[in-house]
Image (cartoon, rainbow, N blue to C red):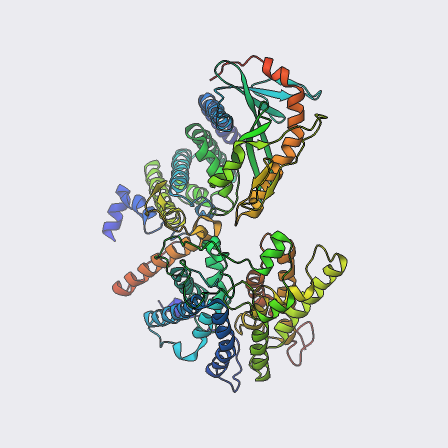
Amino acid sequence: MTSRNRKAVIGTDEFIKGIWRENPVFVQVLGMCPVLAVSNTAINALAMGLATAFVMLMSNTLVSTLRNFIPKQVRIATYILIIATFVTIVDYAIEAISLDLHKSLGAFISLIVVNCLILGRAEAFASKHRVRHAVLDALGMGIGFTLALLCLGGVRELLGDGALFGVAVFPDGFEPWIVMILPSGGFFTLAAWLLLINHMQQRKEAKTGRVQEVPR
Amino acid sequence: MYRTLVGVGMFCGLLIAIVFQGTLPVIERNRAEALERAVFAVLPAASQRTTYALTPEGEFVSDTDAVGQRVHAGFDSDGRLIGVAIEASGMGYADTITVLYGYAPEQEAIVGIRVLTSKETPGLGDKIEKDAVFLENFVALDVRLDPSGETLQHRIVTVKRGQKTQPWQIDGITGATISAKAIGEILATSSERWVPIINEQLEQLVAGESDDES
Amino acid sequence: MSAKNKTLEIDTSPHIVSGASVEVIMRNVVFALVPVCIFSVYVFGLTALITLTAATLSCLLTEHVLCRWRGDRSTLGDWSVAITGILYGLTLPPALPVWMVVLGGVVAVGVGKFLFGGLGHNAFNPALIGRAFLQAAFPVSMTTWYPALGAERFAVLPPSTFTLPFASPVYDSISGATPLAVIKFDGDITAATDLLMGLTSGSTGETSGLLILAGGLYLIARKMMNWRIPVAIFATVFALSGVFYLIDPAAYPGPLFMLFSGGLMLGAVFMATDMVASPMTSFGCVLYGVLIGALVVVIRLWGGLPEGVMYAILFANAVSPHIDNLIQPRVYGTTERGAS
């Protein structure tokens, strides 16, 4: 207990938890819309993950900074306003960086605004914690989200296209599993990852004989 | 309460305005470049382009920012008209397919095509973008006007793979019958509408100064 | 720990034990399928034999390994997986590469059956899950048909059968087209006698309508199959396509063609009747059959695909619990509103 207390003061725990123990995709199963929709290639997954992480970082910072000024009655409206602002900024930035990427991510950039993960972090964490912790929380969650998306995008691109980040991995003559880049492939891959991670979790629990509390 | 909302709103608005101003020129340049690339891809000999808008009176007016009813005339380095790039769309197997195709008045043929947007099934329907034999169709696809000049002599049709005998036929794709037929249909409908208009206004396009904007 | 274990124990239906055990029924289904298998090998040659064997073995092996991994007794003995494997093999194109057959078999049993809880818990027909996965993953291979009654079918294997794992198959230039694809894309109708006798291109086991019907009749006679489901499907397809045929004989195929082409016979007799994934009440079964029949006609006539039996059955599988809910028989001694 004491070690956890010390960690809480420094904030490393806030950072680590989002990456593994409370991973937004594999443990909390939040924000499934972009996870399933734009994880068809590793590049798309990386871009979507980073865009979400950026929005989360900025909104968490701002919400935490303003947490004593935002009246309780209009807090959700204010959070959405802040989140929408950064989503718009990300939208412009991606369009300026690469038109093709913007086209392949499509409406899902704008839809970051309704990603319950971001609003969830603002409401459940940033509005109650100091800025430093809110930043670490957002970074951890953002990295966790990006890594999870990459896990999906990597597998889907590898099997569905025989490539990774657009570079062919398998020799010529590889037969692509077209289902993997179709929407149903997203469900298959997510299910496979959830199966694997839950299995690992269960084995760990069986070994230590302790049930881990998973916040929902 | 309202003060906070208004304050946050103003701050956010300001932020967006700054970013918008900062990225706008880059985005516009990207878009122009992408369009340019597409136009040059469907008119391989062109190196300059001018966008023309079709006025309600049926005349072409040079208008770089034209949207909707527009064509892109491509010129070679000497300013000679190579052809006209036209956007067309229609229903594919999965969703609307949008293509850009190049029409060369001198050859009276479609000389290039590029799929701009399509959600056709990967591996099957998206052969319309990749299949070499299929793309071979659009090196010289006949869209000759009939003597009256008001309609095409032969409507473009998609036939089964290996059964192309006439220059206005498109050699289809085995396993992607519907997508290949959709492309044929899109080109047929669009060429029937645009080719007579372009030929009628040809002088205007040839005479039109090609403004350098690249 | 203790809070987690305080759950209400629910068991899936059926709750009434009848005389015939799973094992006896399943063995008879295998008997009913044997003639279909033999005929498919006769029509398509060696490659059909290899496809069927690979399909059955991959399903059996997957089941065995997964049962052991879970720490249960292996359920190979009750023949149910063997049926899944044979049916799955019968739905595949004869010249499909063996590695794809095996992959689909793993998906069929692993995803279609085991993830739902094993025997008696599958929401969908496992064989069709495997086929649906392959259809989505390798659409080209799944729609490249080996011609029926080829001269060298017992001497030479098509080059695609033994493709290296994960490599793209190479197909002969000679490939057949199924009667349904022929009518959809070219507008030609295959002769009814060829359809009836099964002398056409198609999936390994879907072509021989007569033998499938004979197998179905045998099972119905031994009261091991719910006759309402296939009858409802056939009646619906016949009636619906008959109506359209009468309206415009030039645009729509006749009802007999619809009945005997594609996978309708195999699907209606052996797939839709999966005891676990179909409704429990008699009236429910009729509704279920009508739904499948209507979907098949809709997909075939207006869909982008030439064949729709697989999707129709999978869809009806998903709906079947709701059908059961909708027409729950009144509990004895109560009124419609529930109170007595």
Residue B167 appearing in the image: yes
Q: Quadrant of the C terminus of chain C?
A: bottom right
Please count the marks in the image: 0
Q: Quadrant of the N terminus of chain C?
A: bottom left
Q: Position of residue A137 (x, y in %)?
A: 34, 42
User: In screen coordinates, is A105 left or right of B59?
Assistant: left
- Seen as rendered, the residue at the extreme front is C151
- Seen as rendered, the residue at the extreme bottom is C19
Pick the residue in front: C315 or C106.
C106
Residue C67 position by quadrant: bottom left
Pick the residue in front: C189 or C243.
C189
Q: Position of residue A153 (x, y in %)?
A: 39, 46
Residue A164 position by quadrant: top left
Residue A108 appearing in the image: no
Vertical order, B74 against A175 (above or below): above
Q: Position of residue A198 (x, y in %)?
A: 35, 59
User: In screen coordinates, is C108 left or right of B113?
Assistant: left
Pick the residue in front: C102 or A5.
C102
Q: Position of residue A6 (x, y in %)?
A: 24, 46
Pick the residue in front: C151 or A208.
C151
